[in-house]
Amino acid sequence: MGPAELLVLTFPQETITVEAASALVKLRTAGDIRVIDSLVVTRHPDGEASYGELGDFEHLKGVVAGAGEELPLIGPEDAQEAAELLKPGTVALLVLIEHVWAEAAATALREVGGRIASGVRIPPENIEEAVRAAQARVAAGK
């Protein structure tokens, strides 16, 4: 198995859109990653939180039907922790993924006694900012 990661994707509305669910279904079939589990967490306008599977949402049933079985690894504690990140009237999609593209490297690493000790997720906007700064330095001849 390759490295795994739990992502918390937040959205500014109270429910997951068909477009977001469709993007997740496409990830399942792309091959670079494997979706191990997913869970929707909603913080309602009154501040209460609830969670459920994508198939629990009537407007998503046609999108996620037949998308493959997930393992029930994301639990109530994960849902509660994610709910604490949300503002009232917003929703999060928790996605546990395996980086299939790195499986061969991870296997080779384990065979020689190595392990992945840590990982850091860098937000895309931070990378974009760093690229702009590097380009400005190059343009200035520095």
Image (cartoon, rainbow, N blue to C red):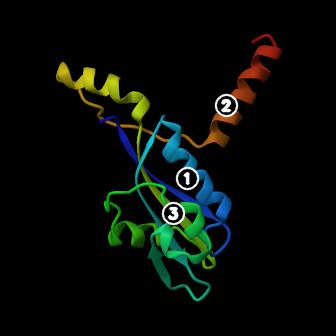
Left/right of residue 107 with respect to residue 140 in the rendered view: left
Quadrant of the image occupied by residue 120: top left
6 lies above or below 102: below
Structural crowding at the residue carrying mark 3, measured as other residues with C-alpha within 10 Å and reported as few (<14), some (14–19) or many (≥20): few
Q: Which mark is residue 65?
A: 3
Q: Amino acid at mark 3?
A: Ala
Provide residue 37's location: percent of width, then percent of height: 39, 56
Q: Which mark is residue 69?
A: none
What secondary structure is found at the residue carrying circle 2?
Answer: helix
Left/right of residue 129 with respect to residue 121 in the rendered view: right
Residue 117 visible: yes
What secondary structure is found at the residue carrying circle 1?
Answer: helix
The reply to whether callout 3 and callout 2 are in contact (CB within 8 Å) is no
On the image, numbered disc 2 is attached to which residue? 130
On the image, numbered disc 1 is attached to which residue? 24
Closest to the camera, between mark 3 and mark 2, is 3
Q: Residue at x 63, y 40 (%)?
A: 124
User: Which callout, 3 or 1, points at the residue further toward the start of the chain?
Assistant: 1
Quadrant into which the N terminus falls: top left
**Residue furthest to the bottom:** 46
The reply to whether callout 2 and callout 1 are in contact (CB within 8 Å) is no
Alpha carbon of mark 3 to alpha carbon of mark 1: how far? Answer: 12 Å
**Residue furthest to the top:** 141
Closest to the camera, between mark 3 and mark 1, is 3
Q: Residue at x 40, y 37 (%)?
A: 119
Structural crowding at the residue carrying mark 2, measured as other residues with C-alpha within 10 Å and reported as few (<14), some (14–19) or many (≥20): few
